[in-house]
């Protein structure tokens, strides 16, 4: 019985490391599926608007999925948001994604300077995007919610492609 539980747990972890829905259906259904699950578990309305369709380089899809996953975790765990909006669009050679919540907000500088005490979520998001040539801007203030603005490359340069995993 214990071995069966361990096996199930390991299988779940492996799917979380590389969600098969990314490979099977693509990044848009994967993000919708992720948001739907978070919405149900946290009773949190999540509105998604995607104005771009098409596959992206694998490293970009994984990075986008993971950053959205972390942002939704933050919105439920820390922000206590009552709504989240995800907007994804294409601008020139970049994929632009904004994730906004109406939660508690926070002092961005204080959290970034004290990442050892507060965890590595935001730092990890920035590093994941930077590894593929992307950027993350964070806008927040106490009592005013949080907005994350990301730009991800539509194409991955050879110099960056190996670092995003």
Image (cartoon, rainbow, N blue to C red):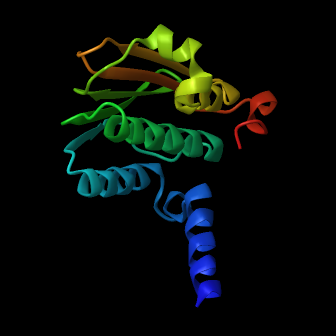
Query: Who is closer to the viewer here, 155 or 104?
Result: 104
Residue at point 62% right, 47% down? 58
Residue at point 52% right, 27% down? 118
Q: Position of residue 103 (x, y in %)?
A: 25, 27
Query: Who is closer to the viewer here, 153 or 103?
Result: 103
Query: Who is closer to the viewer here, 159 or 79?
Result: 79
Q: On the image, which quarter does residue 163 sit in?
A: top right
8 horizontally vs 150: left or right: right
Position of the N terminus, as image quadrant, is bottom right
Q: Position of residue 110 (x, y in %)?
A: 49, 10
Residue at point 24% right, 15% down? 144
Q: How many marks are shown on the rendered structure? A: 0
Residue 18 seen in the figure: no
Q: On the image, which quarter does residue 16 sit in?
A: bottom right
26 horizontally vs 155: left or right: left
Residue closest to the far front: 117
107 horizontally vs 67: left or right: left
118 horizontally vs 149: left or right: right
Query: Who is closer to the viewer here, 46 or 102?
Result: 102
Residue at point 40% right, 49% down? 31
Q: Position of residue 49 (x, y in %)?
A: 27, 38
């Amino acid at each position: 019985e214990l071995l069966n539980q361990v096996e199930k747990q390991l299988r779940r972890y492996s799917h979380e490391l590389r969600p098969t829905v990314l490979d099977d259906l693509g990044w848009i259904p994967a993000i919708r599926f992720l948001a739907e699950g978070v919405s149900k578990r946290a009773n949190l309305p999540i509105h998604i608007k995607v104005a771009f369709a098409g596959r992206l380089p694998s490293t970009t899809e994984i990075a986008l999925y993971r950053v959205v996953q972390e942002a939704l975790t933050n919105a439920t765990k820390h922000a206590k948001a009552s709504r989240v909006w995800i907007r994804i669009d294409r601008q020139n050679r970049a994929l632009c994604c904004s994730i906004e919540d109406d939660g508690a907000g926070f002092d961005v500088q204080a959290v970034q300077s004290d990442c050892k005490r507060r965890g590595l979520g935001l730092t990890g998001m920035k590093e994941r995007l930077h590894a593929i040539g992307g950027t993350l801007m964070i806008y927040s203030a106490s009592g005013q919610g949080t907005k994350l603005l990301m730009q991800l490359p539509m194409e991955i340069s050879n110099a960056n492609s190996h670092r995003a995993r």
